[in-house]
Image (spheres, rainbow, N blue to C red):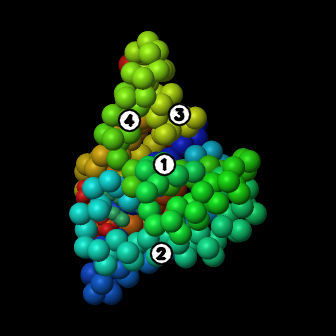
């Protein structure tokens, strides 16, 4: 049975779910947030150490302004209303991605990270304005400036994920089989599950079914 420490999720399908059931993409984002809460709870039940959630990519800025604004207002409200609860549950929140949002949101994010920094039950890495290619480019620039030797370890020490072990398992919901610029380096040896269900329809049961399958896989890491 494989140990499971770190699950990364591409939470895709909110817009399609919203259009189908509520005639609005934004309603899908709202429903998607309820799935986030369920999966956080279940991650604690499953004794995961890290849960990385792809919430907004560097490419998602291409979307209509009203959708982007709605997404960030959802996040702001979530942080305002749920931070204490997360903290009480001993959850650590870390943002990966470039924090160049409104000053109100930047402040909320920094406050949330600071408040939960010493927590140790589950670390949630929220990938926000995250893009793997820019992360790699920025790390190369820093490594170059540092004059250190070009090695795997020295390079990844400049990644935003530097203190986080690579994901054991990647799940993408929403019936699409691509990585969309998510953790390209870190997923080199992760087990990948593509789930047909749209994110708002994804349940604890679906999550547990995937975990059960994951545990049975023979992971080789190049060995036999
Ligand atoms: C994923 O759902 C959430 C974000 C990118 C913020 P989508 O909004 O991409 O939903 P679909 O793929 O359009 O259905
Ligand atoms: C990936 O979903 C990003 C997030 C879930 C945050 P997208 O819906 O943006 O991916 P593409 O554009 O379909 O590849
Ligand atoms: Mg999508």
Who is closer to the viewer here, 32 or 156?
Answer: 156
Q: Which circle, 3 or 4, is nearer the viewer? A: 4
**Residue under circle 2?**
74
Element assignment for label 2: helix
Name the residue rendered at 42%, 35% in the picture.
186
In the rendered picture of this protein, how many numbered marks are placed on residues?
4
* Among the two numbered marks 3 and 4 on one chain, the one whose residue lies closer to the N terminus: 4
Q: Does the closest atom of ligand 2 sit within 8 Å of the Cβ of label 4? A: no
Give the alpha-carbon distance from disc 4 to disc 2, as whole Å: 29 Å
Q: Which circle, 1 or 4, is nearer the viewer? A: 4
Q: Position of residue 127 (x, y in %)?
A: 45, 53
Name the residue rendered at 43%, 28% in the picture.
142
Eyeballing the image, is 17 above or below 156?
below
Report the residue that reaches farthest toward the top: 149
Eyeballing the image, is 220 above or below 36?
above
Eyeballing the image, is 212 above or below 100?
above
Who is closer to the viewer here, 190 or 81?
Answer: 81
Numbered label attached to residue 96 = 1
Q: Estimate how packed mark 1 is, as few (under 14), some (14 to 19) or many (20 or more) residues with alpha carbons within 10 Å.
A: many
**Residue under circle 3?**
162
**Residue under circle 4?**
138
Element assignment for label 1: strand
In-image side of 21 versus 107 (left or right): left
Please state, as top left, top right, bottom left or bottom right, where the N terminus lies in the image: top right
Give the alpha-carbon distance from disc 3 to disc 4, as whole Å: 13 Å
Q: Estimate how packed mark 2 is, as few (under 14), some (14 to 19) or many (20 or more) residues with alpha carbons within 10 Å.
A: some
Numbered label attached to residue 217 = none
Q: Which circle, 4 or 2, is nearer the viewer? A: 4
Name the residue rendered at 25%, 68% in the picture.
63
Give the alpha-carbon distance from disc 1 to disc 2, as whole Å: 18 Å
């Amino acid at each position: 049975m494989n140990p499971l420490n770190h699950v990364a999720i591409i939470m895709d399908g909110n817009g399609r779910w919203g259009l189908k059931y509520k005639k609005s993409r934004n309603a899908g984002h709202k429903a998607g947030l309820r799935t986030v809460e369920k999966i956080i709870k279940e991650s604690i039940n499953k004794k995961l150490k890290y849960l990385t959630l792809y919430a907004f990519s560097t490419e998602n800025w291409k979307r209509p302004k009203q959708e982007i604004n709605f997404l960030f207002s959802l996040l702001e409200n979530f942080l305002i209303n749920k931070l204490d609860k997360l903290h009480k549950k001993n959850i650590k929140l870390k943002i990966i991605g470039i924090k160049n949002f409104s000053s109100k949101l930047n402040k909320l994010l920094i406050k949330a990270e600071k408040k939960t920094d010493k927590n140790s039950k589950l670390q949630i890495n929220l990938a926000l304005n995250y893009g793997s290619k820019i992360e790699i480019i920025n790390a190369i620039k820093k490594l170059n400036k540092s004059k250190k030797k070009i090695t795997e370890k020295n390079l990844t020490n400049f990644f935003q994920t530097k203190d986080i072990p690579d994901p054991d398992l990647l799940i993408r919901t929403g019936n699409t089989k691509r990585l969309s610029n998510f953790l390209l380096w870190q997923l080199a040896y992760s087990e990948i599950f593509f789930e047909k269900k749209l994110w708002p329809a994804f349940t604890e049961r679906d999550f547990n079914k995937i975990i059960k399958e994951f545990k049975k896989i023979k992971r080789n890491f190049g060995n036999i």
